[in-house]
Image (tube, helix red, strand yellow):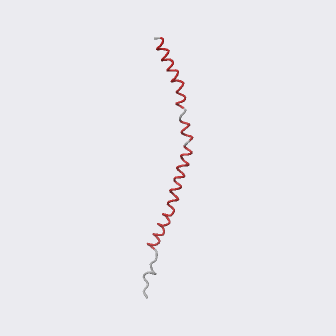
Amino acid sequence: MKKITQIALSGIVLLATAMPALAETSPRTDNSMTLVYLFLGFCGLIIFLQLIPVLALGIGMIKGFFGHKEAAHRTH
């Protein structure tokens, strides 16, 4: 019985010393959020820069559809 008590007590001491190491994982994830936000911002910038030519072409098409067509309807 004394041997079982020593083993159980050793296990409890081992687990008690390991608990603070397991509890210290949260600051590690908070420090990387800055890099995650920078990466997502860079991805958003790339997507935005890809949309600029699309918007320019769309505006040009709208101007072409609704523009004046007097030159094409002239009769000689």
Looking at the picture, does residue 48 appear above or below residue 35?
A: below
* Residue found at x 44% / y 81%: 72
Looking at the picture, does residue 17 appear above or below residue 25?
A: above
Looking at the rendered image, the quarter that the C terminus falls into is bottom left
| Left or right: 41 in relation to 72 | right
Looking at the picture, does residue 72 appear above or below residue 9?
A: below
Residue 19 placement (x, y as % from top left): 52, 27
Residue 6 placement (x, y as % from top left): 50, 15
| Left or right: 42 in relation to 66 | right
Q: Dividing the picture into quarters, in which one does residue 35 lie? A: top right
* Residue found at x 49% / y 60%: 51
Most foreground residue, 9 or 73? 9
Q: How many marks?
A: 0
Residue 40 placement (x, y as % from top left): 52, 50
Looking at the picture, does residue 11 appear above or below residue 56?
A: above
Residue farthest bottom in this picture: 76
Most foreground residue, 64 or 2? 2
* Residue found at x 54% / y 43%: 33
Residue farthest top in this picture: 1
* Residue found at x 48% / y 17%: 7
Looking at the rendered image, the quarter that the N terminus falls into is top left
Residue 34 placement (x, y as % from top left): 56, 45
